[in-house]
Image (cartoon, rainbow, N blue to C red):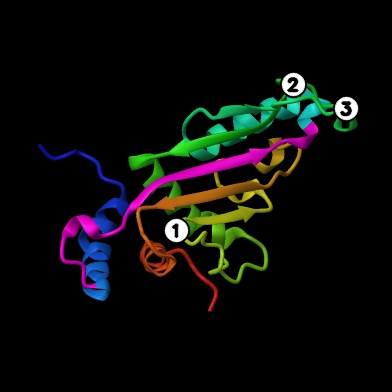
Amino acid sequence: MTRPYQPRLAEKYREEIRGTMKEKFAYSNDMQIPNIEKIVLNMGVGEGVGDRKKAQAALKDMELIAGQRPVATKAKKSIAGFKLRDGMVIGAKVTLRRDRMYEFLDRLVNIALPRMRDFRGVNDRSFDGNGNYAMGLKEHIVFPEIDYDTVESIRGMDIVVQTSAGTDEEAKVLLAGFGLPFRK
């Protein structure tokens, strides 16, 4: 039974990227071809210590960007110098898988990154050595879901793409196939 809807990048992976990866790296088995396993979004809210409304606004913005409800990250221990108590909300995180992951990656590559000021491509040295890629955005308002007029404060966010690739070179070819614009 075929699924009625497939994200555009999922079809592109199945029809184009898998073939080019198998040809370039000479995989003997189709199961060796790397794929994207998950994308994790993280947004820290340092000013949420003094005002709970800012933490709630960050959770709402993260939900709009990701398309699913985020998990509030809480402080593990109290730090008096930061006026931080154990259990206070200090951020939000979301793990995207399957269709939502492909939809987010499509919006990131085709809409959000081109809207960034002075954008010249993403850093090609942000791999961790195991085929995973991490990047940061300084402004979360580059996503079209966020209404600039209703945003109280502009926050940054971290985006981590976990792949099944064994090396950084394989992961770079995989992500470039999805259209992630690496610097020349």
Mark number, residue 130: 1
User: Can you give x and y, in whole percent of width and height, for residue 128 in the image?
Assistant: 52, 59
Is residue 128 in sight in this rendering?
yes
On the image, the x and y values in percent for residue 7 come to: 31, 47
Q: Residues within 10 Å of mark 3 (few under 14, many from 20)?
A: few
Viewer-nearest residue: 51 or 110: 51
Which residue is drawn at the image coordinates 16% and 66% (left, top)?
28
Find numbered disc 1 in the image and state the secondary structure of the residue it sits on.
loop
Element class at badge 2 = loop
Residue 68 badge: none
Residue type (three-letter) at the residue carrying disc 3: Ala
Mark pair 1, 3: CA separation: 37 Å
Label 3 residue SS: helix
- Whether 153 is drawn above or below 130: the answer is above
Q: Which amino acid type is marked by label 2?
A: Asp
Q: CA distance from mark 2 to mark 1?
A: 33 Å
In the rendering, at what x and y percent does residue 173 appear?
Answer: 38, 69
The residue that label 3 is drawn on is: 80
Q: Is residue 44 magenta?
A: yes
Residue located 71% across and 37% down the image: 151
- Work out whether residue 146 can be spotted: no
Does the magenta run of residues contain 61? no
- For the magenta stretch, what is the residue range? 26-47
Neighbor class of circle 1 (other Cα within 10 Å; few <14, some 14-19, many 20+) is some
Residue sitting nearer the eye, 151 or 47: 47
Q: Residue furthest right?
A: 81
Specify the farthest residue to the left: 1
Name which residue type carries label 1: Asn
Q: Earlier in the sequence, mark 2 or mark 3?
A: 3
Q: Are marks 2 and 3 in contact (CB under 8 Å)?
A: no
Q: Identify residue for label 2.
A: 86
Q: Is residue 157 left or right of residue 165?
A: right
